[in-house]
């Protein structure tokens, strides 16, 4: 990120002067429209926006692999129509698909032959040959996937609870954008905080976390109030309400690596891709807090690089700092592919038989390794009340609105929200945790 730009615009005006100039004469609805127009114009509403290069190809491969299970199934009619649609839709020639087609014939024969061992090996060979065909065609230029490939990526992301799609099978951008009520409450409260002298003159970012949206929605959005640009959008966890357990249980859990994540429980609300979570300001509740928050200092803790948060509303969230409610990464281990599935077992079997030796198999194994780290994400809402965010690489939006380079999602948010750019301190930003139209606050009521 460029340094020296967080506190001033190119003309040397203070950030608040720029905000006042941009906002002069604009209603809340007009400002909301300006942010939404910017959001839609960037392509950011597509959840595959940050899935560049190998990560984009990995999602396609993961989606295709799931579908292949229906093509040659044990003692069931083969769905060869799907495979032909895949071949044609991805622009694969007859010569490029010859090996996979032969393996499909072998698999179909084995599926009806009564020998389960022969079937599973034939099925693994068919999967490997088909995916090898796909990788060979697109590995060198994964950004040039045909439109047909995008549909598979969206479908895979939907199955992994990463996105909601329209009936046409495209990302539902309207539902992913922050609601007007959340935006208006956040902005009115921010302006009143500014009037009360609680906002530094060079602070420019306001983050809205819309807890009325489910945890598979990208419900955290960072707004640059000085430019009316959306700087970042991502998934964010909420508190699970699960007890920390006895000291002995806590010690045992702390020694486990990777540290297990408890499955979300009803104690944290009925979310699990449903409604908004329960909230609390109480110690040991392990629930999230609503209201206005100021980003505090960065530190390294249990979850690695993290950002302390200071609740600004008495009786609502003013215990956040003492409760240890922070912004932290949600771990790449939460985004792992299942490395013990039939596909990789099939690769191992085939490798031992020498059926697919050589460069093709090496490339396939290499791609499988990369997919195991970044192919998919199972969005999980279980934290101890913290703002847990993905640690996947994301594109960095520059002050001029362009996207250049990429950074760990957690690190980007810590720099934006914590008021740092390349290690240079500027000004902390503010966060508003929204809980619905009935939410009350002295800053906007």
Image (tube, rainbow, N blue to C red):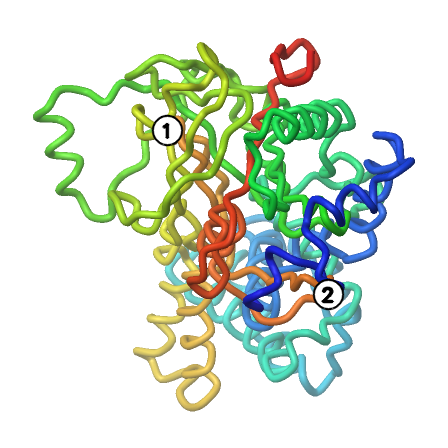
For disc 2, the marked residue is 10
Query: In the rendered image, which quarter is residue 441 located in?
Result: top right
Comparing 83 with 412, the one in front is 412
Camera-side mark, 2 or 1:
2
Query: In the rendered image, which quarter is residue 11 located in?
Result: bottom right
How far across and down, in percent of the image, does residue 172 sit?
A: 77, 41
- Among all residues in the image, which is located at the extreme left? 248
Q: Is residue 404 above or below residue 309?
A: below
Q: Which mark is residue 299?
A: none
Q: CA distance from mark 2 to mark 1?
A: 48 Å
Q: Is residue 376 above or below residue 369?
A: above
How far across and down, in percent of the image, does residue 108 sit?
A: 58, 62
Comparing 213 with 112, the one in front is 213
For disc 1, the marked residue is 263
Dot 2 or dot 1: first in sequence order is 2
Comparing 106 with 130, the one in front is 130
Q: Is residue 229 above or below residue 268?
A: below
The quadrant of the picture occupied by the C terminus is: top right
> Circle 2 sits in a helix, a strand or a loop, which is it?
loop
- Taking the spot 74% from the left edge, 38% from the top edge, the residue there is 177
How far across and down, in percent of the image, does residue 306 sit?
A: 36, 46
Comparing 241 with 434, the one in front is 434
- Taking the spot 76% from the left edge, 49% from the top edge, the residue there is 18
């Amino acid at each position: 990120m460029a340094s020296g730009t967080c506190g001033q615009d190119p003309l040397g005006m203070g950030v608040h002067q720029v905000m006042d100039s941009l906002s002069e004469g604009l209603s809340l609805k007009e400002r909301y429209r300006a942010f939404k127009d910017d959001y839609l114009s960037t392509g950011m509403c597509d959840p595959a926006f940050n899935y560049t290069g190998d990560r984009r190809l990995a999602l396609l491969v993961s989606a295709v692999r799931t579908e292949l299970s229906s093509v040659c199934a044990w003692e069931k009619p083969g769905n060869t129509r799907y495979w032909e649609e895949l071949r044609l839709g991805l622009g694969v020639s007859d010569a490029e698909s010859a090996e996979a087609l032969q393996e499909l014939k072998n698999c179909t024969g084995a599926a009806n032959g009564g020998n389960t061992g022969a079937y599973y090996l034939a099925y693994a060979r068919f999967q490997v040959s088909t995916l090898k065909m796909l990788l060979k065609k697109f590995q060198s230029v994964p950004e040039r996937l045909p439109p047909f490939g995008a549909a598979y990526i969206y479908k895979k992301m939907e199955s992994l609870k990463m996105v909601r799609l329209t009936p046409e099978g495209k990302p539902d951008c309207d539902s992913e954008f922050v609601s007007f009520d959340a935006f208006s409450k956040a902005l009115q409260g921010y302006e009143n905080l500014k009037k009360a002298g609680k906002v530094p003159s060079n602070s420019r970012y306001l983050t809205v976390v819309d807890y009325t949206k489910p945890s598979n929605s990208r419900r955290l959005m960072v707004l640059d109030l000085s430019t009316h640009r959306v700087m970042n959008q991502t998934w964010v966890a909420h508190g699970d309400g699960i007890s920390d357990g006895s000291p002995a249980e806590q010690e045992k859990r702390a020694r486990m690596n990777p540290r297990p994540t408890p499955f979300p429980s009803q104690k944290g609300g009925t979310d699990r891709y449903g409604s908004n979570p329960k909230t609390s300001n109480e110690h040991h509740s392990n629930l999230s807090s609503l209201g206005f928050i100021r980003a505090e200092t960065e530190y390294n803790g249990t979850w690695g690089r993290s950002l302390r948060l200071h609740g600004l509303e008495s009786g609502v969230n003013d215990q956040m700092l003492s409760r240890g409610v922070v912004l932290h990464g949600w771990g790449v281990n939460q985004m792992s592919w299942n490395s013990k599935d039939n596909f990789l077992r099939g690769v191992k079997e085939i490798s031992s038989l020498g059926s697919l030796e050589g460069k093709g198999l090496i490339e396939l194994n290499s791609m499988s390794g990369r997919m195991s780290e970044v192919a998919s994400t199972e969005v999980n809402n279980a934290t101890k009340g913290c703002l847990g965010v993905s640690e996947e690489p994301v594109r960095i939006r520059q002050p001029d609105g362009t996207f250049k380079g990429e950074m760990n999602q957690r690190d980007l948010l810590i720099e934006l929200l914590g008021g740092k750019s390349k290690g240079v301190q500027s000004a902390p930003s503010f966060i508003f945790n929204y809980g619905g139209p009935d939410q009350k606050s002295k800053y906007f009521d």
